[in-house]
Amino acid sequence: MRPRLVFVHGVGGPRDATAELEGLLRALAEGAGAAGHSRVVPGLLDGSAADVRFAHYGDLFMDGRMQGGAGRSTVEAGPEALRELLLEAVDERLAGPADEHEARVLRRARTQLAPEGEQQGLGNVGRLVLNAANTLMALPGLRRAGSWASAAMMVHHLGQVRTYLDREGASGTVPGIDRRIRERVAAELDPVGPTVVIAHSLGTVVSFETLHDHPGPVPLFVTLGSPIGMRTAVRPRMRPHPLRVPESVGAWLNFWDRDDFVVGQPALEKHIAMNDAAVAPVSRRVDSDGAWAHPAVKYLSQPGVAGPVVEALEAAALR
């Protein structure tokens, strides 16, 4: 049996799905080779080792009303919600060790997000968010690795997390966007045979919720750079609540990097209950080369990430 391998992307706008999938597979192949699975690399790249799919939903965030098709501004859609998300990300980052430059940038951004004695009207909150985002762009590698040409683009992309979690009909979001995104992901899963799911960033939230309604087996669920650990901005808004591992999941590996800005509390096993088969998330730290680590390809090229994926695909193929 040829198992299915589904990649679920994170924040960002419409993308070339074919090019994106090729990049993800190349990164996975690089990591697999480094993990001692070089014999599997040709099969990953030519599709013989797995039925590879890419769940794409970035276009659903675009309402076409902004010039050039850039989509709705997430600051306009929910400035207070986005401020909460950025503030929590900054606080989590400040709680860990940081060099002097990084700490100075983070402290300045926090002051901009939560100034003392200022009125917090919607327009003012939007301004505070953009100012803080502009400051955060000074973090090493953030602009380059996030593919963000401006602070406004960064805000727009990160705001997709809260747009999804605002659910249908709330805060001016597109009605039913969360449901339509999950339908896109569900359409790529094998309803009967085994599916290994690799989800990144916002895609980890979407996949977690989608898998609760998925009937087929998922021998391995891999989450990369997940914001699920954010204790106020993300986790309480996820469904179903209280959070527990989907029954379809046979194993869950959650990878995080200290240099990944959007990861909150990374030890998901502390916050998500086991399923009936006693499966719990297992969180593992990986270390990048020092550049900002959030892109999925940074994770997939790590042997500690790619190795378990290849092993799960090989095991599923033998069933």
Image (spheres, grey):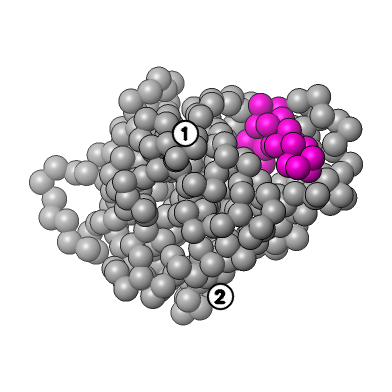
Q: Secondary structure at mark 1?
A: loop
State whether the magenta stretch is mostly helix, strand or loop: helix
- What segment carries the magenta color? 296-319
Q: Secondary structure at mark 2?
A: helix
Q: Residue at x 52, y 53 (%)?
A: 211
Give yes or no for residue 23 being in the magenta stretch.
no
Horizontal side of residue 190 vs 172, given as left or right = right
Tell me if I can see residue 38 in this picture. Answer: yes
Residue that badge 2 annotates: 68
Residue that badge 1 annotates: 278
Give yes or no for residue 308 being in the magenta stretch.
yes
Contact (CB < 8 A) between labels 2 and 1? no
Reply above or below: 129 against 312.
Answer: below
| Separation of residues labelled 2 and 1 (CA atoms) | 49 Å
Residue 277 lies, in percent from the top left, at 49, 37
Sequence-wise, the earlier of marks 2 and 1 is 2
Crowding at label 1, few (<14), some or many (≥20) Cα neighbours within 10 Å?
A: few
Horizontal side of residue 233 vs 144, given as left or right = left
